[in-house]
Image: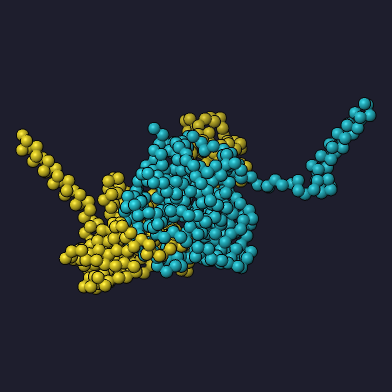
Chain colours: A yellow, B cyan
Amino acid sequence: MAYKKYCWLFVSLFLFTGASAQLDSSRSAVARYFFDGPNITCEFNAQTYASALLLKDSIYVEFTDLNLLEGITHPETWSKEGWTMVQIGPEQFQIRKNIADFKDKPNWLLRMVSAEMGVAAPDSVLLKYNIEAWSEFKNPNIVDPVETETGNVLFQLHGFTHKKQVILTGSFNHWNEKALKMHKTADGWTLRLQLNPGLYHYKFIADGEWMHDPNNKESVENEYNTLNSVLEVGQLVRFYLPGFPDAKNVILAGSFNHWNTQALHLQKTDLGWAIELSLLGGKHKYKYIVDGKWMLDPGNQRVERDREGNENSVILVK
Amino acid sequence: MLKTTATWHQLFYVCLLAGFVRWTGIVSALLWPETTITENPWTQPNIIRIPFRLSGALITVQAKVDTVEGTFIFDTGASNLLLNYRYFKNNGFASESGGVTGKVKVKGKIRADSVILDELERRNITADLIDLSHIERAKKIRVMGIIGYSVFEGYEILFDYSASVLILVRHNEKGVLLEKIPDWEYEAIENFPLTVKDHIAMLTIQFGKKKKVFGLDSGAEQNLLDLLVGKTFLKNNFTVLKRVKLNGTGQNSVEVMTGNLYNGQLDTFNFKPMATILTNMQDINTIYGTNLEGILGYEFLSQMPMSINYKKRRITFYRPASLKP
């Protein structure tokens, strides 16, 4: 029995060590940072680093701009931008920089663009917090749309079948020029996305050439004096006013239709009045007009006063 | 006695007549100097919900300054209204003289007649003109300007990133809210004291036994941590992931270390690890007039709905009512 117990302990230890190694492998494969006294130190294996460099693995290769491999033949004399090198094993090197030697001072505007730099963050410590490692800085609230068969918007480009590749890009994915590759069909290109309610601008990139959607009449001129195609994605919202069985005419007026008092007539239902509308993302103010009398939506607690002092019901569409 | 009564009666009628004259506007200038008419001709709502969109991790809102309408960045790190030189250079300069503050060049000043942010309206507000073309290029959007403290002064600001909405709640000169955020919408769970220096709200956060003071800044896409925060502190609470060269805001490339800040705690609230830039914060501290060891931006503000009251010097954490247990 004792033999079995120790055997399990051994197996468990083995598994645990293996798991730890796996967690850290993404980082330590090329370079690993740590604080070492007054220094920030980066330790790496020269061979692994060299192969990563050849693969142009930009996420993990930190010092490509410093011509690191060139320096390895004379590590003791290598120095750049305050970093110095020490060889600590046949293939193991450290480059260090004293914290006091970081002289660059980001200006006030730079704090506003730090999400654009693509931070590599495969981090075993994050995994302990059950947070998935990121391959770059990702904003969890903004997930760029990906292709989905059940998406609510089908993008189509007719013709251009002689092109090798067509990319869809737009304000929905921060004009990413690579992410959304369209599929070639017999008579053009298609791609289906799921988009939140809102107003979007988009273009196609056909073999590197930017073009607006020739089949979409809605377009606006952009800062490059070309056209962006415009797409409105709405969300279906049901407005329901219970009661008022004797009313003759119930109208919905709101910021979504410039408070038009004639356009949106609610239909009488068994228990009240209702209408469905497709609304863009954002805030919409509205009121009902029952036989000429304006009233708030009794079923919506969200009421706001506007600058003129009028009270309106408010709906937030996201 | 009778005579006195008659005099009082006469006085009463004189007052009544004067009131009528005042009401009708006749010879009002003679009876009442112009200083008596001070009421604003418009009202300001007490609660304003402002939907926003994130660009990267920045809050962008739709607003209108004079006749220019478009996308603005909502930035608690800005002391006033900053307008993009590109779109406002023809709006009439109040002053041609610029200046350099923390290496951000001010190209001039203008006086905006009105700033309209949803139902919030400010009039006669001074704005700095700056070059925002670098931000526009990085974000790939047109940015008309940056809405800073002078625009939302007088309001408590609730940030709810998960619902993409800001809620501005008006307060009096003592910071007391004129209307409560409805319980059915947000349930306050705890509040903590802030210190405020000019427009920067500062929060003390614990990391084990250490306490560090951070500025709250919705314009910071990642947190910032000063390199001089202390070696032991860094070793215990920060992991370096990558060396990055930032550029694109009119500066030569700037070397920073990026990583994650761990173990942040406030009473019973344990904050999730936050993507943070380790750097020299001297220039940013100069612009803020502070001596901060770090800045908490999107990474902190988006962890749960929270509101900042600059007058009460208080931060409140909320639970959206939809998540009530």
Q: Residue at x 39, y 38 (%)?
A: B268
Q: Nearer the viewer, residue A95 or B63?
A: A95
Observer-nearest residue: B66 or A1? Answer: A1
- Residue under the point 82% across and 49% down: B29
Relative image position of residue B34 (x, y in whole percent) = 77, 49
> Could you say which is closer to the camera, residue B317 or residue B143?
B317
Q: Residue at x 16, y 49 (%)?
A: A18
Give the mark count.
0
Q: Is residue B239 something one can see in this rendering?
A: yes
- Residue B127 position, x and y percent, is 58, 59
On screen, residue B42 versus residue A149, left or right, reads right
Query: Is residue A218 left or right of B64 when viewed as pictured?
Result: left
Would you say residue A252 is visible in this rendering? no
Residue at the extreme top: B1
Task: Residue A28: give x, y in percent of width and height.
Answer: 23, 57
Quadrant that contains the N terminus of chain B:
top right
Depth check, front residue: B308 or A191: B308
Q: Residue at x 43, y 62 (%)?
A: A106
* Residue projecting furthest to the front: A37
What x and y, as percent, mark residue A145?
35, 53
Which quadrant is home to the C terminus of chain B? top left
Would you place residue B12 above or below residue B119 in this image? above
- Farthest residue to the right: give it: B3
